[in-house]
Amino acid sequence: MRTLLIDVWKRLTPWSKSADVYANDTDNAYPERMDRLINNSVTAKSAAAIMVQYLIGKGYGEQNDTIIVNKSKNTKLIDFACDVSEALVKQRGVYIHINWNALYQIADFSIIPYEWCRLGKADSNDYHGKIAICKEWLKPKKTDIQLIDVYNPDKRVIDTQVEKAGGWDKYKGQVLYISMDTGLIYPLSRIDSVANDCDSEAQASVYKNRLLRKGFFGNTLVVTRPLIGDGLELGSKALIEAESEREKFQQAIKDSLGAESTGGVLCLEMDFAGEKLDDAILIKQIESKIDDKLFNYTETSVRENILVAFNNLPAGLIKTNETSLFGNSGEAIREMKRTYWENTTKERNLLTSIINQLLQKSQDYPSLKVEPQKLIDDAAVNNPK
């Protein structure tokens, strides 16, 4: 069997004439889709949270963690670091808004939700001079799209932008755009290759929930002869009394079988031969149709794929119910932590570099340089190799 190129899915970034931006996939909703897939997958969401923790470590020291990097939003350095690391973990890219002062120092900075941002038109050198920001990209109105200049600390560039804006009081600042896929217009999400696995895990949960709530699983089937005889006129007193007796009988059966603690009771009336009590009423338990072995295999396989996508996160850091993992005073867990600290070196170094780049040019902390505190005592801050 041969796989054709056209059969292989690819995220596209076409030019959108209506919005004057490069769309992130054909429906321009790729970031939102990836974010929902992560949030709907228990493994992906847990893995993302753990990876974020490994990027910031134990923080940058109590004193540094609490410095305010955006006074208008009261944003602390550690909170900003968490926001940046979450974007790098989920989307493998981040947009940071920067305000300059008249001394060409960074007055403040804050993250812009990744889903809000798109790139504007590129010049002959593939340089995108504007970042378009909009809260809703499915059917955006041009009046709702805000254009902000791309980050460039050159004083002459800033002067030109300020003059064009009509003065410092009208200047919107710049946006620093970081992409971990420098060869693409937009980076691919960390779960791009396992998007179907994330969806499979979510849908498996939905399927089992619906089967348990609305399906036949755990139901009891009660079959009796017809409880209302033939020949009763519609609306007659005899028919009304007979229907009332039927309801009381069926309710008595449900109460006696403990219907509230089971899936429920289904009552069915039909004619069948026989004079004994056993022939007059049949009670049958409807068994589950959930294939536990199949579900266990499916959930295990998709979980493993998702964990690999998050820099090969050891399963024991998420699921640690196996008693063997805690042998030797937790040495196995410590080894997993050391391994994953190394696995996340690239992203952690990028995060640290972004923060120090901003602090170095800031008006309040130009001499401050931070490093994440390691999570385990015998792990190096950066890759020990």
Image: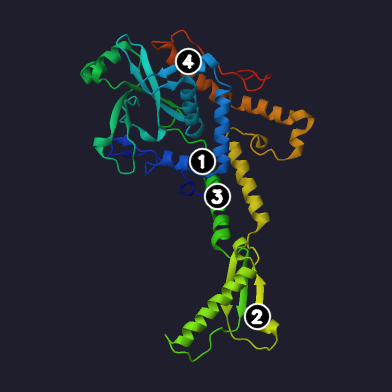
| Residues under numbered marks 1 and 4 in contact, where contact means CB atoms less than 8 Å apart | no
Q: Mark 2 or 3, which is nearer the eye?
A: 2
Disc 4 residue type (three-letter) = Asn
Q: Residue at x 66, y 50 (%)?
A: 297
Query: Mark 3 highlights which residue?
Result: 200
Secondary structure under badge 2? strand
Closer to us: 136 or 13: 136
Mark nearer the N terminus (1 vs 4) = 1
Residue at the spot of label 2: 281
Q: Which residue is farthest right?
A: 328
Locate residue 284, reporting x and y percent: 66, 72
Quarter-of-image position of residue 167: top left
Which residue was labeled with disc 4?
A: 356
Q: Is residue 239 above or below residue 116?
A: below
Q: CA distance from mark 2 to mark 1?
A: 50 Å
Q: Earlier in the sequence, mark 2 or mark 3?
A: 3
Point out the frontmost of discs 4 and 2. Answer: 2
Left or right? Give the position of 382 relative to 102. Answer: right
Q: Which mark is residue 38?
A: 1
Instruction: Give percent across and percent down for residue 226.
Output: 57, 84
- Which color scheme does this rendered protein use? rainbow
Q: Three-letter amino acid code at disc 1?
A: Ile
Q: Is residue 342 left or right of residue 139?
A: right
Q: Residue at x 47, y 45 (%)?
A: 9
Assign a secondary structure to mark 1.
helix
